[in-house]
Amino acid sequence: MPSSTPILDRRRFGLGLLAAGVAGRAEAAPVPIVCWGDSLTFGAGVQTNGGRYPTVLSRLFTPARPVRNAGVGGESSTQVAARMLADPRSREGVAVIWAGRNNYDDPNRVRADLRAMAARCGRSLVLSILNADVPEEHRGRPGHRAIRALNDALRDEHGHRFLDVRGPLVERGLAMSGLKPTAQDRADIVDDVPAQPLRADHIHLNDAGQAVIATLVRDALLLRGW
């Protein structure tokens, strides 16, 4: 009767290949993330390079994921979109899009730019636009109403790809940072703007504010399986 050893050896060899394949998938490189935007993404206002939200976002994953900061200060949504659409790598990975703050007074242009950017990458997350601590953009004022209307339109258009960071930053940002509100902080919240301990100036976020954004983005990406 022929020996069964060669058959057993082939089975062991096949199981070894299967195990190697499973291990290879487990060790596959994480999907890269690119954060597109203006000075809010770049991190104007942070004390250290490590305080920028894309950098913090990378560290919030275990293991850390590659995150590229593609924020450029002063750019409109049109300029951010032009950079993204010209980048051949922008179809890959996950795109986090935070643009339109510098030209929110042209909502149709902002919506068209963000629509083109979101369509560029299959896994894209569009963040809401922040309002500044200036009278024109306090609760109930024309700038505030314009930004809220634009954010509502972005939510309706992008659905599960939309992430509201403005509301949680105002309402829960201090608590997420382990800070207790002062009287001035409560006044900021009444005005519907991020509290001063989260900001470096009237609009740019400091390290604490950027960390809040990173946490909100991390949670949103995990929820979507990205």
Image (cartoon, rainbow, N blue to C red):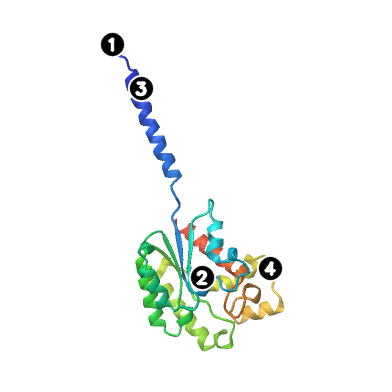
Q: CA distance from mark 1 to mark 2?
A: 73 Å
Local packing at callout 1 (Cα closer than 10 Å; few below 14, some 14-19, many 20+) is: few
CB under 8 Å between discs 2 and 4:
no
Residue 196 lies in what quarter of the image? bottom right
Q: Residue furthest left?
A: 1
Mark 3 / mark 4, whichever is N-terminal: 3
Residue denoted by label 3: 8
In the image, 148 versus 89, the foreground residue is: 89
Q: Secondary structure at mark 2?
A: helix
In the rendered view, would you say 223 is above or below 191?
above
Mark 2 residue type: Thr
Q: CA distance from mark 4 to mark 1?
A: 79 Å
Residue denoted by label 2: 41
| Residue 113 x/y as whole percent | 38, 76
Mark 1 residue type: Met
Residue denoted by label 1: 1
Mark 4 residue type: Leu
Q: Residue at x 58, y 85 (%)?
A: 134
Local packing at callout 4 (Cα closer than 10 Å; few below 14, some 14-19, many 20+) is: few
